[in-house]
Amino acid sequence: MTPTTTRSRPASGGPPRPRAGMDPRISARRAEVVRQQGRRRLRLSGLVVAVAAVTFGVWCLLHSSVFSARAVSVVGATHETVGQIEAAAGLSGHPPLLDISVGAEESGIERLPWVRSASVSVRWPDGVHVVVTERVASLVMTTASGTWAELDTNGRVLADVPTRPPGLIEVTGTQPPGAPGTVLGAADQLGLHVATTLPPSFRAQVTEVKVTSAGFVQLAMTTPILVDIGDGTQLQAKYEDVSAALAGATLHDGDIIDVSVPGAMTVTAP
């Protein structure tokens, strides 16, 4: 029987064992290369872990109260409070500055009744600065409950107040205005248009713009006289007739100036 010869193999892992007849220096060099590769892998793994830990720490710090919107400053707001502006912008909970969306905050603030425009800027480490441009009340309307609604020239309802504010032209339409922040509907656009296009020559004398259900407009004056404008056509020509009548005609309390047909003005006694 032929004797069986067994050879032992080197165990997996670790530096390779020198082959029979291999120069010991070559074997040692190969073992050193393997050890260096292991050390490089270990250092690289440690570096990855360290970078991840630092990144997570920075993320946690930036989202902590240290860098949150704790100091909110507001410029230009006289009708809306800082608290109302913070709530509209979503700043009441002092969110992290990194989570603030400037565009969304500005849109939220501009939904407040008195705000025409808003500009929001982040100021590190803990500040948010808001610049507000407010609307101007130019008109008033009576509400369904008997109070007074202040409006701007675009028909936006700004506020609901118990007494009529002085110096504002009243618009009487076919339906009452909505809540603050809403805009007059199509039915009241004629009255709004007349009230906002009155010429300087007699605008200060107008106390009320009345619009009937038939779509005719009448002006109540401080004199006191009434002016029948008629429908909403040829307004500039009608305004010129009104200016001429107020400047040249002898008028008495209660007179009615009819300019519904441009160039054919009439004055009727009460």
Image (cartoon, grey):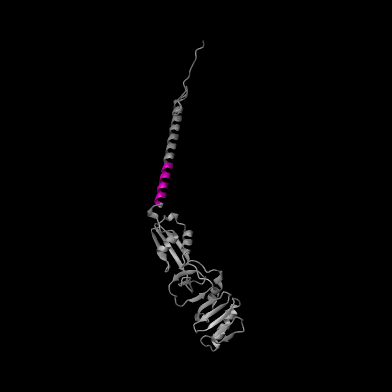
Q: Specify the quadrant of the image occupied by residue 237.
A: bottom right
Image location (x, y in percent) of residue 193: 55, 74
Say which residue appears at 42% left-offset and 47% top-offset. Answer: 56
- Judged by its main secondary structure, the magenta piece is helix
* Residue 162 location (% of width, % of height): 43, 72
Q: Nearer the viewer, residue 23 or 127?
A: 127
Residue 52 inside the magenta-drawn segment: yes
Residue at far front of view: 145
Q: Nearer the viewer, residue 131 or 179?
A: 179
| Residue 136 in sight | no
Task: Tell me where residue 201 appears, x and y as whole percent.
Answer: 53, 82
Residue 122 in view (yes/no)? yes
Number of numbered discs: 0
Q: Which residues are magenta?
A: 47-61
Quarter-of-image position of residue 67: bottom left
Q: Is residue 99 above or below residue 141?
A: above
- Left/right placement of residue 123 relative to residue 238 reads left
Please give the name of the residue rendered at 40% of the width and 61% of the height, measured from the top-left corner. 72
For residue 53, what is the image quadrant? Answer: top left
